[in-house]
Amino acid sequence: MTDNVLHIIQHYRHDLMNRLQLVSGYLSMGKVEKAEDKLNEAIAYYEEERKLMQLQAPSLMLWILEFERYYKSYSMTYFIEATSTTSNHLINDEWIVNKCNQIMHELQNHLNADSMYEVEIRIIDNINNDRWDIVFSIQGNIPNLAIDVLQSNLGNVQIERFNDRLQFVFSLTRE
């Protein structure tokens, strides 16, 4: 456990330093607009992270932070669409992590290991329907997969294909 925490902190620090060095480099070259863009990207990234922390979902947060460590051919972005009352409704993060791992397992069985893929996860607090909606998208060199086979292996997950992108949608009743 200690090694995992240390690795997360090292990766986190490395990522933060890279972002700051980019801003500093652009400023030293007099490219103020580029520096502002990179600074705004960093602020947006950490704003999403703040929203992730507010979910009070430690398993999900660790899974997201360690994602690229375990899935080398995949990069990830995530977005939390929630309201200020979200923290009053706990999320079953272990269930979400389990479902995401099932999706990743299926993808690794069907996708080219030598290609790079972009994963996007949206966690949406669907207050009107008293549930959490999770939209898991992957983009890249995606072969023609039998959606019905994926569907049967993943259970209650809606799957759609859009050219070079697959989208998996599943929901979880709010606690």
Image: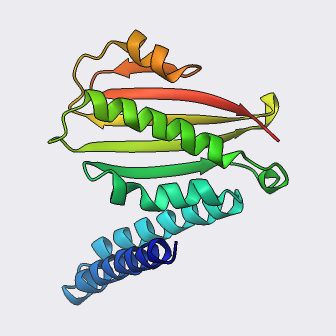
> Residue 100, position in %: x, y?
50, 39
Horizontal arrangement in the rendering, residue 161 relative to residue 81 (left or right): left
State the image quarter where residue 19 is shown. bottom left
Horizontal arrangement in the rendering, residue 122 relative to residue 153 (left or right): right
State the image quarter where residue 127 is shown. top right
Q: Most extreme residue toward the front, as rendered? A: 1
Residue 139's place in the image compared with 142, above or below, is: below
- Residue at image position (67%, 56%) is 57
Q: Most extreme residue toward the left, as rendered? A: 114
State the image quarter where residue 110 is shown. top left
- Residue at image position (82%, 52%) is 85
> Residue 102, position in %: x, y?
47, 34
Q: Nearer the viewer, residue 24 or 164?
A: 164
Q: Indicate the colouring scheme.
A: rainbow
Q: Nearer the viewer, residue 38 or 66?
A: 66
Q: Nearer the viewer, residue 173 or 39?
A: 173
> Residue 112, position in %: x, y?
18, 34
Q: Quadrant of the C terminus?
A: top right
- Residue at image position (70%, 62%) is 54
> Residue 56, position in %: x, y?
71, 60
- Residue at image position (47%, 16%) is 151
Horizontal arrangement in the rendering, residue 141 relative to residue 65 (left or right): left
